[in-house]
């Protein structure tokens, strides 16, 4: 999710329960977290701020982009693939929903089926605290979401009045900032509770902030305010309830359009008629390319082009966010400006911009604030598109052509790595070329002789039995730090699914990265050719469960972001595949659905459902969804608890 996720600052708004109040890693930092504390700066502080701000707009944009890229590489995300009638074996549709969310904490999914007889019947999962199904299906439609690249907030730079740092100018006229005193209880060093009071300031645009990921924004002769497009969005529940009542993908598109309640996600959906929908219809600031060109500050001109983050001139009233007649409120883009694609073959998204939702029909008519066009796609996006193409052509090793419930499940749990496909064979040859079987490393030559044969015979998957996979993962994690890049052939916008490619195995930095990975495993006592599951696992109670999958940077659809223990390997999962659903519609039948909640339904170690689905995930097995009353009644484990009013 761009600038989002576990470990990133929390972007909290007033309109959504905690699990939904995050995106892009911005937050207004509380006063006790920094020196300036967002109280009015003194003259000395203003001078210091001016000195600290001497970073060129180009360098600032580079830092912001680096922070955002780092956040995207190691934070939450999702895959979703919607296959229409032209791409299925039975002529209906198949949906894969595969969000990559935390395995611990408040952002865990929870499965349920919500039913009002004759009015509403939806099965799926929600984040804790949200009363509607966020990802799921009903009798006629299935849907999932992926984190969008749209930037849902923006910055305004205002000029402060000399000698009065809480006064700023708009169209040459002074305006007073609004101050709000906030008192919070904090724990003192001796363990007692005490009160800390701070004054938080806001301009007409929003709260004053002094940093975004990558750069500081000191308050001195200028100040920066953040405007949050979701601050007035109270429509999320309406949107998901409308989606839950949809009868086809047209109804889903209508729900998105009429509510504009989704806060930071794309929607990917299918229906029983065989339609596949991609839509990034959500809350997006009304910052057109024209407004950005006219109103961006020097910093904004650099950052907007690189990241889609608008930094506008707050001293001009004409630089306020615009409005569209079809938008549900002023200040956000109307649905007609936002990307949507309906197909009968497929659409997909893996957290890149809308551009290649289907490469046969590229989306290019949307503002920069929504996402980029013609740029490098993530290896996970490449893997998703490649996997779909191979399944449709019958060249993926599975029987027949086209998707069914079974082949979609098998595609996901093939755990195939795009990076391995591009580089594993070259890596094996590089390994075999090292003199005396020793690779260079930062700590000197390291013996890699046992790794070469494993890499040569490896199929490029991250199954629990895959030998050499862990070594390759630790190697690939270092490739992003290779000066000048690790690939010989650069990205080509005319071939975005297959470039960049060709590992630069003669590059000394690439060779050293391989040696460092081997040295790391050797120091941990891990054999270079050990099966993945031997050193990638979770422990639940007395049970140790091997975990298949791999980090986002390896281009595996089944993302697993593990916790690395220098002595044991990958010993826990931070986030990754969470609630997974595969839904198939065929003519005249109820949907066939397989689900899996990878970390299980309960966080209570004493519950029978604390690790039951984790064990299934470890074994590559699924849960058959019981949706109809007949299916539910036929379950041998059915228990009915009737609540009687007293």
Image: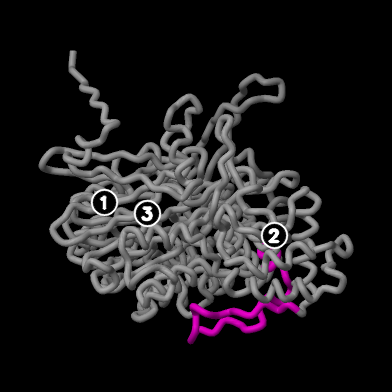
- Mark 3 surroundings within 10 Å by alpha-carbon count, few (fewer than 14), some (14 through 19), many (20 or more): many
Counting other residues with Cα less than 10 Å from the Cα at mark 2, is it few (<14), some (14-19), or many (20 or more)?
Answer: many
Report the predominant secondary structure element of the magenta stretch.
Answer: loop
Q: Which residue is mark 3?
A: 263
Residue in the image at 27% along x and 49% along y: 240
Residue at mark 1 to residue at mark 2: CA–CA distance: 39 Å
Residue linked to disc 1: 137
Q: Secondary structure at mark 2?
A: helix
In front of the other: 288 or 167:
288
The front one of 91 and 382 is 91
- Taking the view exactly as shown, the residue that stands out farthest to the bottom is 494
Q: Give the side of residue 77 with respect to residue 346, left or right.
A: right
Residue located at (30% from left, 53% from top): 261
Compare marks 1 and 2 and give the one earlier in the sequence.
1
Looking at the rendered structure, the secondary structure element under dot 1 is strand
Q: In the image, is residue 187 above or below residue 646?
A: below
Residue 166 belongs to magenta span: no
The residue carrying pointer 1 sits among few (fewer than 14), some (14 to 19) or many (20 or more) residues within 10 Å by Cα, namely many
**Disc 2 or 3, which lies upstream in sequence?**
3
Q: Which mark is residue 471?
A: 2
Q: Quadrant of residue 502?
A: bottom right
- The magenta stretch spans which residues? 476-505
Number of numbered discs: 3
Locate residue 279: give its quadrant.
Answer: bottom left
From mark 3 to mark 1, how far is it between C-alphas?
Answer: 20 Å
């Amino acid at each position: 999710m761009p600038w989002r996720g576990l470990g990133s600052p929390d972007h909290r708004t007033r309109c959504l329960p905690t699990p939904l109040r995050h995106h892009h890693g911005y937050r207004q930092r509380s006063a006790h977290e920094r020196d300036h504390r967002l109280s009015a700066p003194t003259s000395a502080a203003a001078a210091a701020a001016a000195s600290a701000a001497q970073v060129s707009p180009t360098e600032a944009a580079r830092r912001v982009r680096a922070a955002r890229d780092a956040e995207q590489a190691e934070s939450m995300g999702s895959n979703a693939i919607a296959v229409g009638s032209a791409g299925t074996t039975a002529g209906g549709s198949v949906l894969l929903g595969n969000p990559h969310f935390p395995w611990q904490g408040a952002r865990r999914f929870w499965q349920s089926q919500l039913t009002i007889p004759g009015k509403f019947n939806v099965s799926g999962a929600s984040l804790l605290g949200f009363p509607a199904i966020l990802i799921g299906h009903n009798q006629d439609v299935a849907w999932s979401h992926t984190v969008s690249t749209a930037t849902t907030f923006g910055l305004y730079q205002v000029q402060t009045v000399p000698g009065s740092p809480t006064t700023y100018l708009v169209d040459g006229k002074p305006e007073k900032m609004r101050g709000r005193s906030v008192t919070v209880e904090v724990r003192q060093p001796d363990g007692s509770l005490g009160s800390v009071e701070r004054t938080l300031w806001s301009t007409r645009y929003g709260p004053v902030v002094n940093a975004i990921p990558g750069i500081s924004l000191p308050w001195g002769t200028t100040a920066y305010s953040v405007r949050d497009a979701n601050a007035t969005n109270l429509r999320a529940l309406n949107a998901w309830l409308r989606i839950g009542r949809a009868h086809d993908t047209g109804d889903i598109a209508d729900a998105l359009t009429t509510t504009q309640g989704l806060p930071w996600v794309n929607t990917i959906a299918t229906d029983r008629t065989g339609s596949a929908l991609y839509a990034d219809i959500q809350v997006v600031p009304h910052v057109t390319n024209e407004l950005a060109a006219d109103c961006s500050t020097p910093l904004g001109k650099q950052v907007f082009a690189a990241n889609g983050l608008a930094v506008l001139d707050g001293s001009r009233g004409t630089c306020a966010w615009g409005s569209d007649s079809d938008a549900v409120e002023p200040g956000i883009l109307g649905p007609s400006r936002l990307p949507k694609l309906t197909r009968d073959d497929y659409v997909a998204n893996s957290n890149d911009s809308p551009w290649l939702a289907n490469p046969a029909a590229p989306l290019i008519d949307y503002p920069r604030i929504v996402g980029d066009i013609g740029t490098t796609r993530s290896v996970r996006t490449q893997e998703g598109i490649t996997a779909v193409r191979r399944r449709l052509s019958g060249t993926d090793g599975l029987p027949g052509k086209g998707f069914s419930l079974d082949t979609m499940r098998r595609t996901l749990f093939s755990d195939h790595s795009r990076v391995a496909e591009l580089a594993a064979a070259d890596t094996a040859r590089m390994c075999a070329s090292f003199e005396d079987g020793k690779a260079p490393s930062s700590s000197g030559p390291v013996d890699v002789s046992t790794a070469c044969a494993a890499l040569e015979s490896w199929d490029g998957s991250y199954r629990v039995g895959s030998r050499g996979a862990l070594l390759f993962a630790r190697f690939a994690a270092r490739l992003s730090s290779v000066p000048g890049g690790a690939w010989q052939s650069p990205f080509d916008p005319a071939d975005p699914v297959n470039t960049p490619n060709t590992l630069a195995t003669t590059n000394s930095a690439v060779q050293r990265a391989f040696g460092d990975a081997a040295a790391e495993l050797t120091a941990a006592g891990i054999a270079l050719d050990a099966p993945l599951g031997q050193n990638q696992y979770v422990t639940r109670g007395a049970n140790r469960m091997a975990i298949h999958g791999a980090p986002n940077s390896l281009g595996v659809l089944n993302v697993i972001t593990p916790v690395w223990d220098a002595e044991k390997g990958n010993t826990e999962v931070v986030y990754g595949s969470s609630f997974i659903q595969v839904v198939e519609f065929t003519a005249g039948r109820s949907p066939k659905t397989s689900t899996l909640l990878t970390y299980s339904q309960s966080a209570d170690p004493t519950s029978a459902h604390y690790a039951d689905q984790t064990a299934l995930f470890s074994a590559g097995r699924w849960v058959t969804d019981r949706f109809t009353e007949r299916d539910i009644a036929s379950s041998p484990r059915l228990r009915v608890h009737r609540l009687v009013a007293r």
